[in-house]
Amino acid sequence: MNQNKIVTINGHRYDAQTGLPLDQPDSIRRQPITKPTAAAAIHRTTQKSKTLVRRAIKKPAKPVTPLLSKPVSKRTMDIARSSKITRFAPAAAATTPNIAPKKVATKDIDIPATAHPAVSRALAKTKRPEVAVPAPKAAKEIKDEAIAAAMAKPTIKNRKTSFSKRHPRFLSITGLCLVIVILAGYITYLNMPNLSVAVAASQAGIAAKYPDYRPDGYSVDGPVTFSDSDGSVTINFKANTGDSKFSFKQTRSSWDSSAVLDNIVRKKVGEEYITSQVGGLTIYTFGGDAAWVNGGILYTIDGNAPLSSDQIRRIATSL
């Protein structure tokens, strides 16, 4: 045999074409090889159909249970049972083998991700609470509630708005005017003697003045009088308590101090007088009266008021 047609496997030789072992006897190796039978040879003849035709047969009826004339006793026969038979042993006698419980394979549980506590608190603060939205009311309910609220309120009569509330600007202007008038009146009252003297002086035609100094306890008594014939202005003063009073008279004159001494002072008291020199003025005082001249005006003080020499000098220097 050609060596090219022999295959050695595990120390055994096989025919490469047939695959038969060459180490076996020739009787075994030379057995004819049966060829496979074709499927066409088996299915050459027509076979009978085995499909069930429902249209040609009837539907099978349900089995009828036979009725027994007498009821069968439920009692069973007593049969001696062998102790070797365990099939019918009582349930209590049956012993169950100790079978170890099967171990259930545990699977790794996937733990879901959780938020950090600080993040949870921040989200809880920012989350707005859910506010329940009330259901809309019917028109009749709204009307009834409005009527009930109107009936519950006390009835208030319509009061007329006061004039001050209706015209606040007018009242403020009027009040300001009244304050101005009162202030002007007070200032006029304080300056009334000066005004009176100025009016009388203009009528008499001389520059008469009201003295800035007034002895304590004395005030102007009556209006300021004037005479245009001799050009004189007279201011009368009276004590606030008692009957003491004096007149301060200003007359237009061309005399000097010596003429005043000869014509007025010496004629009244002779030589009983006091001469005072103050600020270029020569003042003659005698028994509470006085006389002096300045700028073409003769000033005289006459009355029963016990004026001192100092008070007279202050009156003369305050003009």
Image (cartoon, rainbow, N blue to C red):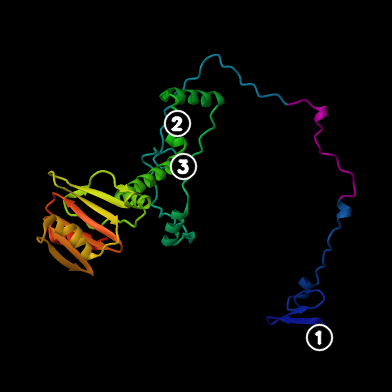
Residue depicted at x 30% and y 52% = 232
How far, Cα to Cα, is label 3 from label 1?
145 Å
Q: Could you say where residue 116 lies in the image, as x and y percent from the top left? A: 44, 62
User: Residue 3 bears which disc, if any?
Assistant: 1
**From this viewpoint, which residue is outermost toward the top?**
69
Q: Give the range drawn in magenta.
A: 43-59
Q: Could you say where residue 217 lies in the image, as x and y percent from the top left? A: 16, 50
How far, Cα to Cα, is label 2 from label 1?
144 Å
User: Residue 165 bears which disc, if any?
Assistant: none
Q: Could you say where residue 199 lies in the image, as x and y percent from the top left? A: 36, 50
Q: Mark 3 = which residue?
A: 169
**From this viewpoint, which residue is outermost toward the left?**
272
Residue mark closest to the camera, 3 vs 1: 3
- State which quadrant residue 275 falls in: bottom left
**From this viewpoint, which residue is outermost toward the bottom?**
3
Residue mark closest to the camera, 3 vs 2: 3
Residue 287 belongs to magenta span? no
SS at circle 3: helix
Q: Main secondary structure of the magenta part?
A: loop
Q: Mark 2 = which residue?
A: 161
What amino acid type should be assigned to the residue bearing mark 3? Arg
The mark nearer the N terminus, 3 or 2, is 2
Classify 42 as above or below 76.
below
The answer to whether residue 27 is seen in the rendering is yes
Residue mark closest to the camera, 2 vs 1: 2
The answer to whether residue 95 is seen in the rendering is no
What amino acid type should be assigned to the residue bearing mark 1? Gln
**How many residues crowd around disc 2 within 10 Å: few (fewer than 14), some, or many (20 or more)?**
few
Residue depicted at x 25% and y 50% = 235
- State which quadrant residue 171 falls in: top left
SS at circle 1: helix
